[in-house]
Amino acid sequence: MRTSKKLNPRQERFVKEYLLDLNASQAAIRSGYSPRTAGAIGEENLKKPEIKKAIDKALAERSARTEIDADRVVQEIGTIAFAKVGKIKAADKIRALELLGKHLGMFVKKFEITEQRGGVLLVPSPVSPEEWSKAAAEHQRRLEAEAKAEE
């Protein structure tokens, strides 16, 4: 049976930095990786079993410590949404819940376009319809250019 590898100091730093904003590229940069390669390094780190395990463990510990999880955020949003309030402003609480939910990854949607050759383009949302159309058109142009280059 294989024992899990121990994280090196840079990988440990990556895990801590990733927990701040759940942004792998920024975590890689803050961990000392080159900004030029941070996107690839961040993505690669998230695929490494020992790093993924460390992140999952840290997230579970934080959730237990703070008693904040997606269920609690949804319950609070529901309470606010269905409350019958008169003159009370809840904007600050709603914004806090929104930020918390985003941090927990609750509101992330991904639209997927599958290419004929099996590749996939993921466009994270929220994006405006204009941004979505622009991304889809650019993707189509790249496909057409690749098809012409193959001829």
Image (cartoon, rainbow, N blue to C red):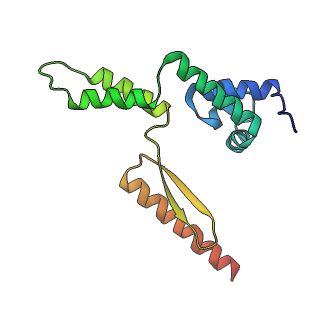
Residue 109: x and y in percent read 46, 48
Q: How many marks?
A: 0
Q: Residue at x 69, y 36 (%)?
A: 52
Residue at the limit of the structure toward the front, as seen here: 1
- Residue positioned most to the bottom: 151
Quadrant (top left/top right/bottom left/bottom right) for the C terminus: bottom right
- Asked which quadrant contains residue 60, the reply is top right
- Residue placed farthest to the top in the image? 65
The answer to whether residue 74 is left or right of residue 35 is left
| Left or right of 17, for residue 63 | left
Q: Is residue 129 above or below residue 148?
A: above
Query: Is 1 or 83 nearer to us in this picture?
Result: 1
Report the residue at 58% width, 32% height from top.
22
For the point 70% across and 29% down, which residue is it?
Answer: 54
Q: Nearer the viewer, residue 147 or 19?
A: 19
> Would you place residue 70 above or below residue 112 in this image?
above
Q: Position of residue 69 (x, y in %)?
A: 47, 27
Residue farthest to the left? 86
